[in-house]
Image: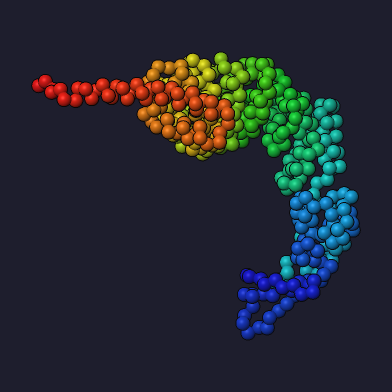
């Protein structure tokens, strides 16, 4: 059904174009001005009153305010508050008018859900914090379920929850009950909620990084439920972002390395793969000696496979992990053994993203500086010189440009040697081969 909207002297008329047979006269329904939003001139579905006393449709006035406007569209008065109060009287009048008309052109306006208010979120946080201190896990479970339902209702509710420090209270609750295996379901529900509440601040992450909390997250990372593993990987990535020796020691003690690699192998989801790669990168970067553990469980071949055919956001993270692995001699040895590495590194320069280019250049330089001339020859033969020269000319960071300059010098020297070798062979051009 197609509609033609006409506006006459602040009144809206709806004219059906394809709804009625040609023999019937054109029908028009006039929307009363008091039912129209002053911004959109459409029938209001969720009328709200702002501080100036003017009623608008909620979507329209929120769009107006979110665009940076601080005045009332009708009166041009500066708003003292952005609070919106539902106008139940007008809404009921609009609903009654829709029913009275009984036209296929007008659908009855349903009663909208009232968005979550900061004062309600504060009360929820207070009750959850109180129940946590008392050790009342049953009450905590009820409140956590309520937060989940509110978050599922709308993105606006989630934003309101995030802006009112619920994340920290949930972290505190998780830390309190993390040692009780009977409460695994509730603990996973908390992690599920936290995945859309980050950043939650250093204090909240520190709660998750306690010995008992870390052990619990590591245990959930080994779950047979893929959704549980996905949530745990996301949280583990955030915990490992803490530059603390004890956190990375916990990771070694609790078998996090093997669990993360297994999650990547199982290809649970793109988001869990990215979370796992970031977590691995942080572990290797902060504790290089742990690279040996990752090498033993086949991390190099797994990341190479991802670089070949994964989406760009996964590819750049896989390259960053390999670059971190190449910080150790053992890591460079394992990387050199894979014949696909150098061709892929050259191919990904200036093709995926700036991060991918930086990682690729860094790895090529490490392999060329610490190995024999074979690595440099391979890079030159694969066309790295032209690509690295392009990086030097394009607007990349200073660190990347410094690496590009160093690489070009190495490859230039190698190219001269290769050229001299070719020239020397020309001297034997006319010598007859013995038969």
Toward which corner of the image does residue 126 lie, by quadrant? top right
Query: Residue 186: in sight, yes or no?
Result: no
> Is residue 160 or residue 112 the one in the foreground?
160
Quarter-of-image position of residue 59: bottom right
| Lateral position of residue 230 relative to residue 153, left or right | left
Q: Quadrant of residue 108?
A: bottom right
Q: Quadrant of the N terminus?
A: bottom right
- As drawn, the residue found furthest toward the bottom would be 23
Q: Who's the residue at 76% across and 33% down the image?
A: 167
- Residue under the point 84% across and 61% down: 74
- The total number of labels drawn is 0
Check the image and tell me how it is coloured: rainbow
- State the image coordinates of residue 348 (x, y, percent, origin top left): 47, 34
Q: Is residue 259 left or right of residue 428?
A: right
Kindly identify the residue that appears in the image at 53 percent across and 25 percent down: 402
* Residue 60 vertical position relative to residue 126 in the rendered view, above or below: below
Work out whether residue 158 or residue 123 is closer to the camera in this orientation and state it: 158
| Of the pair 365 and 251, the residue shown nearer to us | 365
Indicate the position of residue 68 as horizontal and vertical percent values.
77, 50
Q: Classify the position of the C terminus by image quarter.
A: top left
Tell me if I can see residue 291 in this picture.
yes
For residue 360, above or below residue 143: above
Residue at 54% x, 23% y is 324
- Image coordinates of residue 180 in percent, x first then y, are 72, 24
Q: Position of residue 115 (x, y in %)?
A: 79, 49
Front residue (pair 213, 239): 239
């Amino acid at each position: 059904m197609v509609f033609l909207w006409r506006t006459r002297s602040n009144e809206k008329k709806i004219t059906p174009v394809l709804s009625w047979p040609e023999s019937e006269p054109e029908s028009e329904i006039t929307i009363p001005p008091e039912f129209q939003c002053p911004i959109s001139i459409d029938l209001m579905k969720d009328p709200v009153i702002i501080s100036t006393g003017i009623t608008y449709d909620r979507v329209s006035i929120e769009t107006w305010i979110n665009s940076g406007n601080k005045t009332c569209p009708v009166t041009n008065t500066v708003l003292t508050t952005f609070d919106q109060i539902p106008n139940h009287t007008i809404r009921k009048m609009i609903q009654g008018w829709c029913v009275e008309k009984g036209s296929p052109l007008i659908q009855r306006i349903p009663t909208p859900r009232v968005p979550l208010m900061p004062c309600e979120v504060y009360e929820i946080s207070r009750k959850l914090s109180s129940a946590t201190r008392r050790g009342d896990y049953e009450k905590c479970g009820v409140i956590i379920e309520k937060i989940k339902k509110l978050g599922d209702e709308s993105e606006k509710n989630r934003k309101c929850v995030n802006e009112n420090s619920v994340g920290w209270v949930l972290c505190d609750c998780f830390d309190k009950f993390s040692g009780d295996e009977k409460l695994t379901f509730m603990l996973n529900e908390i992690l599920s909620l936290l995945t859309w509440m980050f950043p939650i601040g250093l204090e909240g992450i520190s709660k998750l990084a306690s010995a008992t909390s870390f052990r619990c997250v590591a245990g959930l990372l080994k779950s047979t439920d893929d959704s549980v593993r996905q949530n745990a990987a996301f949280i583990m990535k955030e915990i490992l972002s803490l530059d603390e020796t004890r956190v990375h020691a916990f990771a070694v003690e609790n078998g996090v390395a093997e669990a993360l690699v297994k999650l990547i192998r199982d290809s649970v989801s793109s988001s869990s793969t990215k979370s796992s790669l970031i977590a691995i990168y942080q572990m290797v970067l902060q504790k290089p000696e742990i690279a040996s553990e990752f090498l033993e469980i086949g991390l190099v071949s797994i990341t190479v496979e991802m670089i070949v055919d994964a989406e760009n956001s996964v590819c750049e993270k896989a390259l960053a992990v390999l670059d971190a692995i190449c910080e150790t001699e053992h890591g460079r040895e394992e990387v050199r053994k894979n014949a696909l590495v150098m061709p892929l590194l050259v191919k990904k320069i200036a093709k995926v993203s700036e991060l991918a280019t930086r990682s690729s250049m860094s790895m090529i330089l490490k392999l060329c500086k610490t190995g024999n001339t074979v690595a440099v020859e391979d890079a030159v033969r694969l066309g790295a010189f032209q690509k690295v020269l392009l990086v030097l000319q394009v607007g990349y960071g200073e660190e990347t440009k410094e690496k590009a300059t160093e690489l070009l010098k190495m490859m230039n020297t190698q190219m001269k040697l290769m050229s001299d070798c070719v020239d020397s062979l020309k001297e034997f051009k006319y010598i007859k081969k013995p038969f």
